[in-house]
Image (tube, helix red, strand yellow):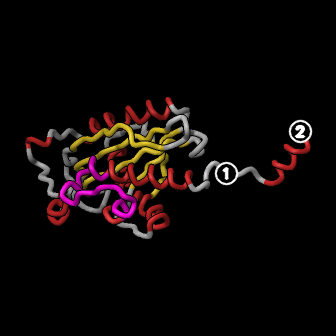
Amino acid sequence: MARRFRGFLPVVVDVETGGFNPRTDALLEVAAVLVTMDEEGWLHRGETIARHVHPFEGANLEQSALDFTGIDPWAEDRGAVHEKEALREVFLPIRKAVKAYGCKRAVLVGHNATFDHNFVFAAAERADIKRNPFHPFSTFDTATLAGLAYGHTVLAEACKRAGIEFSNREAHSAAYDAEKTADLFCGIVNRWKALGGFPLPEPASQQANGTANA
């Protein structure tokens, strides 16, 4: 895994929020899906860690965002926890996976990844969490990758074209969307491998040196 992604461990993240501004709008759900690699170098979707999150004190909640996600932030059956607890519980297994794969840190994979990355980092800053496992600015964006691989950037349609089942009724849950994004990411990386795109072929100069040394 470390060799495949330059020392990074891809971790798929999705958030549900009370708006579009990570500084002012509430983080309501966060989910992370670990990515595993088998001995043959194929990627697979691994464990899902998801938490419902209490709006931070003074957080803005746009009604249009709540209508879109269907989340009631104050519902008692959500089992929501505060941002600090939610992120600690999500970050811990990620740090363990980074260490297990011999990677330097995690890289956030998301569908339109900048949105998820900004909300995760803003929440970590509010919670004063020092051990954030994610790279501070690098991401892998499956909207871009799906546009290349399948000619479409919308998650539901990209999954459909990739042969991945997608339910619009279950969408806009952080866990569900993260799992589908993980399936899409693994599928694209595996397809590239199957087509011969990775591992990279040896440069001609190295092949020549190998022949000469033999």
Membership of 43 in magenta stretch: no
Q: Quadrant of residue 39?
A: top right
Read off the residue under disc 2.
214
Provide residue 9's location: percent of width, then percent of height. Answer: 50, 41
Q: Secondary structure at mark 2?
A: loop
Q: Amino acid at mark 1?
A: Leu
Residue at 18% x, 58% y is 169
Q: Amino acid at mark 2?
A: Ala
State the mark number for residue 200.
1
Compared with residue 27, is residue 160 higher up or lower down, i.e. above or below?
Answer: below
Membership of 174 in magenta stretch: yes
Q: Which residue reaches farthest left? A: 76
Provide residue 20's location: percent of width, then percent of height. Answer: 29, 62
| Of the image marks 1 and 2, the number of the one nearer the N terminus | 1
Residue at 36% x, 58% y is 163
State the mark number for residue 191.
none
From the image, which quarter does the C terminus lie in?
top right
Q: Quadrant of residue 4?
A: top right
From the image, which quarter does the N terminus lie in?
top right
Q: Quadrant of residue 142?
A: bottom left
Q: Secondary structure at mark 1?
A: loop
Residue range (magenta): 158-177
